[in-house]
Image (cartoon, rainbow, N blue to C red):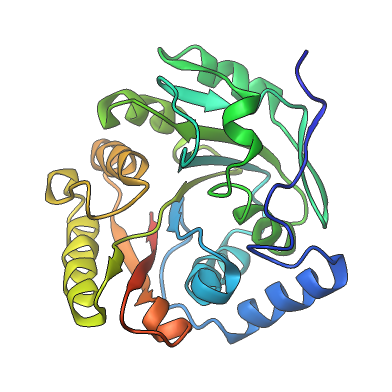
Amino acid sequence: MEPRVRPPAVAGAFYPADPARLRAEVAALLAAAAPPAAPPPAALIVPHAGYFYSGPVAATAYSLLARTRPEVRRVVMVGPSHFAWLDGLALPGAGALATPLGEVPADSEAEARARRHPGVGASPAAHAREHSLEVQLPFLQMTLAGFSAVALLCGQVQPEQVAPVIEEFLGEEGTLVLISSDLTHYLPYEEARRRDEETARAVERLDPGGLDQDSACGLVGVQALLLAARRRGLGATRLDLRNSGDTAGDRHRVVGYGAFALA
């Protein structure tokens, strides 16, 4: 039997479990963000590490969202499955997704549309421990007045199979597509900066072929969005590009984070 609510798995680890502390931390991150001028995004690419590490970069994307598209009422999220092996794309199989700030309802109508695409199913087990989508929810809860979610985890699947699912919703009124991905992992600071700059330029060119397995942990979702954006004639704007050496201090082995808007 499918669960009614998918409970938070990483509250108290990736972000505060106390609602008041969580609200204060997200509010401070948003207040400190200074995204460049960009049109209202149809889609965002955002990182998904603990807020101490990637929160400032993610906040640049959410600050833009709050300023330019507060009317969004549906968020279609695509992220990598870090812990569970699965074929295709997996929905959580739950009626709502919970965080310390409350429950976000699943969008059953949009989920039904997604399920019409090959390879889209449900796996509560895949979502149970996964952080890549959960960490986006408090930011969304703090920037949007109310919204429903379509939460899709990528398993063994090709970008060409994911792109039509994204394109199903891309540019739809009241809808935001959100791709969750960190960039390089555990490289020395300067090497990470060089590799992440190459990745950022590929995103700006809408060039999925310019990315490889070392570019991003959410590679399939990013490549699928770029394919869909090319077909829709969208452009990409870099909002932020930093790594954990910039945000958390240790520069020996860093993780890269980028925020991008597509419109």
Residue extending farthest to the left is 210
Looking at the rendered image, the quarter that the N terminus falls into is top right
Q: Residue at x 52, y 33 (%)?
A: 152
Q: Residue at x 77, y 41 (%)?
A: 7
Number of labelled discs? Answer: 0
Residue extending farthest to the front is 252
Horizontal and vertical percent for residue 31?
Answer: 64, 83
Horizontal and vertical percent for residue 61?
Answer: 50, 66
* Relative vertical location of residue 19 with respect to residue 42 in this rendering, above or below: below
* Relative vertical location of residue 219 with respect to residue 184 in this rendering, above or below: above
Q: Residue at x 59, y 59 (%)?
A: 69
Looking at the rendered image, the quarter that the C terminus falls into is bottom left
Horizontal and vertical percent for residue 120?
Answer: 48, 18
**Splitting the image into 4 quarters, where does residue 125 fall?**
top right
**Splitting the image into 4 quarters, where does residue 18 fall?**
bottom right
Of residues 59 and 80, which is closer to you in this image?
80
* Relative vertical location of residue 183 with respect to residue 82 in this rendering, above or below: below
Q: Is residue 249 left or right of residue 91?
A: left
Horizontal and vertical percent for residue 244?
Answer: 41, 77
